[in-house]
Image (cartoon, rainbow, N blue to C red):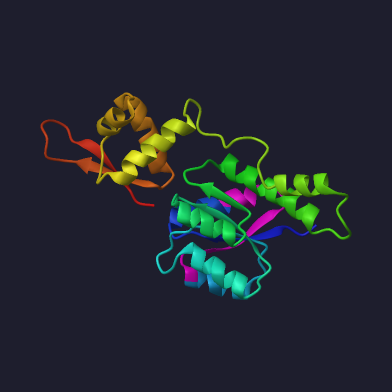
Amino acid sequence: MTDLRVLVVEDEAIAGEAHRAHVDRVGGFTCIAVAGTGRAAWEALGRHEVDLVLLDMNLPDTHGTELLRRLRAAGRDVDVLAVTSARELATVRAAAAHGVVGYLLKPFTGAALRDRLVAYAEHRAQLRGEGDVAGQDAVDRALENLRPTRPALLPKGMGRETLDAVVAVVRTGDGVSAAEVGRAIGASRITARRYLEHLADTGLVARQPRYGGAGRPELEYRWQA
């Protein structure tokens, strides 16, 4: 059986290579290219046969929904999994309207992406066959296969609700410290810093020293995705 061919569309080079590595580690998948812009993605789609696009919505030259629109208008038989930090409901609605097979929010673990890919492969195998479905239950099972069988895993000791709260504070702030985030979400500075460092390691926030106060400078975290 031929591997499913994946195009990664991600403007952050480090994140793009990380996605490539995750894809290549999943059996039955191979990453055929990484594109950093909408234009580069469209050119790659013209050069390669692609089964699945991992699409970041926030691209430097266009929005992911515009690339989706072009794909559908051109009648391209390619599936799209949104892999993005875009949390706006308008973007989620537009992605759904253009038929994405999933919407995976950053930050996520390699295991979360693997589970999405495995679920997609099962879904594709069922719907790409010949003949008819047996009935409504078979249709429901085929569509449910798009959902991973387990929740996305975070590093040990971290919770999704706390991570979402930290993300909300960083996204609305103009550079925040661990102490400031801790006060905003009702957690200790140490706890807040652990989540902030996880976001920094995944490339969603930038960290830099904050000068101007007495004593040793503290780190400041700024949303950059």
Which residue is most to the front? 136
Q: Residue at x 59, y 40 (%)?
A: 111
- Looking at the rendered structure, the number of numbered marks drawn on it comes to 0
- On screen, residue 190 versus residue 25, left or right, reads left
Q: Residue at x 55, y 69 (%)?
A: 69
* Residue 23 colored in magenta in the image: yes
- Compared with 152, 126 (above or below) is below
Instruction: Specify whether residue 55 is in view.
Output: no
Instruction: Specify whether residue 103 is in view.
Output: yes
x and y percent of residue 209 in the render?
Answer: 22, 41
- On screen, residue 125 versus residue 84, left or right, reads right
x and y percent of residue 44 in the render?
Answer: 57, 71
Q: Quadrant of the N terminus?
A: bottom right
- Compared with 75, 206 (above or below) is above
Comparing 88 with 61, the one in front is 88
What segment carries the magenta color? 21-38
- On screen, residue 30 versus residue 185, left or right, reads right
